[in-house]
Image (cartoon, helix red, strand yellow):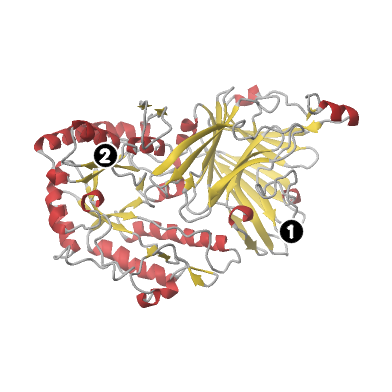
């Protein structure tokens, strides 16, 4: 049995807290405003079904129909795991939860804080804030070890949203769907929509046995496999519960059920999933990553876009102009002579940032970012100044987190700067990984990157990341996965510091296209790459779904133009680019006068509609083709 102990109403959301009578566990439900009035009495047990009737009648009992799950989830090494077949796929609901009792709940305007304490002075602080005017809650959890004993934390969540769905008296059969977005290289953010029946997550005949979908990312390429997002939809009542993690480092989400109710939780990757754990000494605090949660009437896409205001963006009234990238023009051979032929054409098309991709530096000097003088005989500053005459800022590509020596690592002079695992240098293909926890690495990159950008009048940087650290690295923590978390935090800080070191700099976050398409990285940079799909027919399909996870003005979308393009192909490429921040590439200087006139027509229309689309985009995708590469049928967008 459980009791409702508190309702916090904030904006268009209601947060309802329930306490289990026997265990004092406190669970949290989130509902759209007014939906609490639709809550129905829930069955207490299961005994009259065909499967359960005989045993329940004979033994005169009922199987439990509900099991409250704590609004925070933590597990200490040595504590018992939850039974019911959970171990190995779900570390939640361990006996660590039972150590803590609720001592206070306080509402302060748009914020709400719950504090739990143990008998030996350990403390959990669970806080939620609804940013003004927004339809989501920013959540985080803190664990303070006030005891006299070090605690090894094996799993720790940012949020745990349960009691889905209170609007049903039972297990909501044939009413629940799970929404996720799968991501692979050049096929990012593909919507997966599955019923709980399709997922084999119906409750069992006696309600026992944990059902769990645990997913996330163990490596430093943080949304390879899945976006850090999950949503459960109640199709009968039209409500969607959604959650997202900032995810600048490896992460985990779990959608599970034990008995009738469904729970969504997420935060740091746990020990079973990624080998993560962390020792918290007496007096130390562990703080979770930021999570965003919401509940609303509408679609999964509506719920995902509720989170977008957490990302910073430009003034919505500002006109958007195309950017230019030379990647599909020179394919890594960006010589000044050809680019200066393209510059006046790009300027005529409204380009403000003219970005040079890979290939401009000397590869025989890895990590030193020395310009190829044969490509830029007058130096890069002179090239930037030539672009300024056309009203454009120069942009440059860097991949400074990885090191690609064409000789032995020892010969680079940077052998002590790279990550190791078990004492061996970590390597994926040709790539080694610089350790951003080391002051000498930060000092080197500050000089070679930030100083170079300032001295050469570069106003835009594309930060790429093409090879991932697998699951962990050596360091002060006994857990390689925790050491990787610490490294990732230092990487993000360096990205943020570039804004301070190079005033006015605009940053594009990229990782083999869209493998940093997460709330945390979208908030860090002015732009974020959607995909490495440069010329395929799938580009607008990818871009449309990427807009669930970043603002229209941040989402870089390729429009690669060739002199061989007919009117249909040219129009298709330009329309694809309008699905976000248009990025022109290809052979601009070779286009005919007729082709350029067509491109100008589309650019003019794009600039006209962009102020409204920046923050008021209502783009929707209705795609009935399972294939993106070979699409059939239709893909409808409306606004």
Q: Say which quarter of the image contains residue 190.
A: top left
Q: Is residue 405 above or below residue 302?
A: below
Task: Tell whether label 1 touches label 2 (CB within 8 Å).
Answer: no
Which quarter of the figure has residue 153?
bottom right
Residue 110, numbered circle: none
Residue 280 visible to the viewer: yes
Is 101 placed left or right of 334 in the picture? right
Name the residue tied to disc 2.
Answer: 320
| Numbered disc 1: secondary structure | loop
List x then y, in percent, for residue 285. Answer: 62, 59
Query: Which residue in the rendered view is the most extreme toward the left?
Result: 593
Q: Is residue 78 left or right of residue 483?
A: right
Q: Residues within 10 Å of mark 1 (few under 14, many from 20)?
A: few
* Residue bearing the label numbered 1: 78
Q: Is residue 291 left or right of residue 633?
A: right
Report the residue at 40% width, 41% height from top.
Answer: 550
Q: Nearer the viewer, residue 455 or 401?
A: 401
The residue shown at (65%, 63%) is 283
Quadrant of image for the N terminus: top right
**Image quadrant in which the C terminus is located:** top left
């Amino acid at each position: 049995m459980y009791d409702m102990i508190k309702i916090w109403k904030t904006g268009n959301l209601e947060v309802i807290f329930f306490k289990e009578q026997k265990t004092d566990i406190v669970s949290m439900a989130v509902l759209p405003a007014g939906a609490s009035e639709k809550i129905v009495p829930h069955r207490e047990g299961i005994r009259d079904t065909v499967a359960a009737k005989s045993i329940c009648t004979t033994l005169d009992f009922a199987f439990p129909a509900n099991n409250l799950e704590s609004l925070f989830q933590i597990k200490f090494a040595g504590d018992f795991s939850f039974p019911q077949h959970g171990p190995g796929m779900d570390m939640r609901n361990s006996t660590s939860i039972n150590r803590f009792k609720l001592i206070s709940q306080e509402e302060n305007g748009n914020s709400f804080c719950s504090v739990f304490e143990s008998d030996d002075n350990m403390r959990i602080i669970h806080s939620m804030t609804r940013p003004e005017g927004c339809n989501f809650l920013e959540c985080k959890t803190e664990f303070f070890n006030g005891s006299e004993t070090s605690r090894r934390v094996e799993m720790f969540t940012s949020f745990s949203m349960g009691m889905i769905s209170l609007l049903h008296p039972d297990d909501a059969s044939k009413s629940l769907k799970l929404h996720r977005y799968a991501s692979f290289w050049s096929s990012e953010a593909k919507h997966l929509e599955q019923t709980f029946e399709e997922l084999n997550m119906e409750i069992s005949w006696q309600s026992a046995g944990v059902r769990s979908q645990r997913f996330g990312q163990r490596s430093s390429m943080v949304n390879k496999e899945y976006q850090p997002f999950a949503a459960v939809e109640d199709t009968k009542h039209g409500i969607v519960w959604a959650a997202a993690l900032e995810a600048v480092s490896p992460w985990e989400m779990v959608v599970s059920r034990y008995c009738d109710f469904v729970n969504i939780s997420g935060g740091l990757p746990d020990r079973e999933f990624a080998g993560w754990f962390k020792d918290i000494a007496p007096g130390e605090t562990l703080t979770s990553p930021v999570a965003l949660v919401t509940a609303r009437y509408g679609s999964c896409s509506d719920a995902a876009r509720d989170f977008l205001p957490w990302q910073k963006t430009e003034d919505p009234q500002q006109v958007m102009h195309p950017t230019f990238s030379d990647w599909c023009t020179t394919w890594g051979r960006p010589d000044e002579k050809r680019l200066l032929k393209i510059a006046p054409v790009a300027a005529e098309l409204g380009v403000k940032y003219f970005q040079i991709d890979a290939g401009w530096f000397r590869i025989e000097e890895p990590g030193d970012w020395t310009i190829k003088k044969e490509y830029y005989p007058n130096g890069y500053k002179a090239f930037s100044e030539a672009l300024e005459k056309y009203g454009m800022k120069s942009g440059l590509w860097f991949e400074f987190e990885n090191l690609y020596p064409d000789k032995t690592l020892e010969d680079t002079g940077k052998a002590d700067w790279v990550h190791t695992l078990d004492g061996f240098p970590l390597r994926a293909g040709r790539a080694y990984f610089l350790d951003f926890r080391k002051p000498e690495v930060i000092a080197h990159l500050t000089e070679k990157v930030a100083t170079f950008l300032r001295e050469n009048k570069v106003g835009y940087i594309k930060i790429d990341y093409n090879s991932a650290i697998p699951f962990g690295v050596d360091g002060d923590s006994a857990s390689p996965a925790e050491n990787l978390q610490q490294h990732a935090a230092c990487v993000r800080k360096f990205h943020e510091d570039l804004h301070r070191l190079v005033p006015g700099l605009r940053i594009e976050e990229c990782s083999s296209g869209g493998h940093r398409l997460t709330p945390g990285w979208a908030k860090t940079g002015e732009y974020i790459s959607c995909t490495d799909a440069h010329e395929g027919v799938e580009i607008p399909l990818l871009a449309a779904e990427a807009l669930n996870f970043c603002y229209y003005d941040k989402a870089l979308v390729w429009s690669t133009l060739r002199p061989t393009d007919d009117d249909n192909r040219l129009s298709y490429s330009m329309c694809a680019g309008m699905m976000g921040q248009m990025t022109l590439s290809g052979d601009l200087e070779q286009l005919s006068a007729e082709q350029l006139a067509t491109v100008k027509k589309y650019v003019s229309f794009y600039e006209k509609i962009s102020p409204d689309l920046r923050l008021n985009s209502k783009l929707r995708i209705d795609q009935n083709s399972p294939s993106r590469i070979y699409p059939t049928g239709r893909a409808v967008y409306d606004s």
